Amino acid sequence: MAGFPVIDLFAGAGGVSVAARHAGCDVRLGVDSDSVACRTLARNADVHHGGAVLEADVCTLDGATLRDAAHLAPSDPLVIVGGPPCQPFSKAAFWSEDGDEAAYRRARSRGEHLERPGAQSARPDARRTLVGEFLRLIVEADADGFVFENVLSLAAPRNRPILDALIDGAKRAGYRTRFLRANAADYGAPQRRERVFVLASKTATPNAPEPTHSMSRQEQIGRLPAVSAGEAIGRFAGPEFHEPEEVVSGRWAEHLKTVPPGWNYKAHTAWGGHPNPTFVTETRYWNFLLKLHPDLPSWTIPASPGPWTGPFHWESRRLRTPELAALQGFPDGYEFEGSRRERVRQIGNAAPTQLVAPMIGSVVAAISRKSAEVGREVRACVA
């Protein structure tokens, strides 16, 4: 066997599948309901992850169907990985121009009182139930372990009951779990992207993988320096990689040109020292006119950026498809199906491969560690 068999649910463009391959696993199947993402998965299967592709709504599947599609017998080992759609839990959902947080900030800047949106309940969204479907399929497929990943705000008070239900349900089903928060930059990704993980195994509690990189000089003893955006995407700077959509024009184009690398719209506020400020600080979402710094890791790559949502390249243009892919840890040559908007969406929805790979490795190690202990006990009894 090439490695521990893995099924990737909510596979998207295949970032987690690539991570599983990097962790030494045998990716058997990627499942997603999005036809464009499934075409991307299929296009890269032979070279980059090796899994078959099943276009389906997970709500219509059962564990036996998953194993059959992955060519796994009921007794074969299995780890299921995935991250259900994060949009219902994301902070950005409350920071749109018409959103609660934006309204709160604007009211505060005018000296008006408005209830803080964090005190409100979560908005209805059918995708919130997919976390439960993820666990259902794990239990029905009798997986040996699983890796669940999602946005950091899933641990926020308004979303925490969903996370707690996943962990409690897994424990009742016999899994030993570990919950952790992690920053992709601490594991060698050229991106400051925070995620939450639930690592689970039926046989032993998975360890939290040790960070390998650090953005702090004080923490770099025993660790490598964080990988910068310039290191990750510098090779795509040539004109042969030009994309027509990278050109920025319109209302705030001139403002973007004068935003220094590493800054955002606050460069045009009184707080930022601008002599003729256009904006008031803390009244826009943080990635408005946000520009990368070549010597620092990137900020989070969004899946559905607006026309003025960063991060932008430090040369005041939009990032190119291969640059976005590199910041998420996709290998060079990975091909994405669809229009520019669809490519950006697929890449932004992925999780950095450098972050996910050690999480998968930790679960496989926990399963293998216990299996090795059982084997030693059996041999000792025979002797």
Image (cartoon, rainbow, N blue to C red):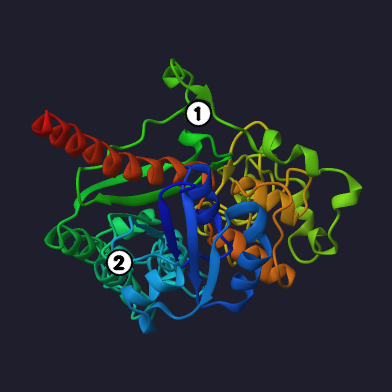
What quarter of the picture does the C terminus occupy? top left
Q: In front here: 66 or 55?
A: 66
The residue positioned 72% from the left and 60% from the top of the image is: 335
Residue beneath disc 2? 74
Q: Secondary structure at mark 1?
A: loop
Would you place residue 105 above or below residue 232 in this image? below
Would you place residue 361 above or below residue 219 in this image? below
Mark 1 and mark 2: Cα distance apart in space: 45 Å
Residue 312 in sight from this viewpoint: no
From the viewer's perspective, tell me whether residue 6 is left or right of residue 263: left
Query: Which amino acid, mark 2?
Result: Pro
The residue positioned 61% from the left and 59% from the top of the image is: 347
Q: Secondary structure at mark 2?
A: loop
Residue 234 position within the rendered picture, expressed as x and y whole percent measured from the top left = 76, 38
Residue beneath disc 1? 215
Residue 337 position within the rendered picture, expressed as x and y whole percent measured from the top left = 70, 69
From the viewer's perspective, tell me whether residue 36 is left or right of residue 245: left
- Which numbered disc flags the more N-terminal residue, 1 or 2? 2
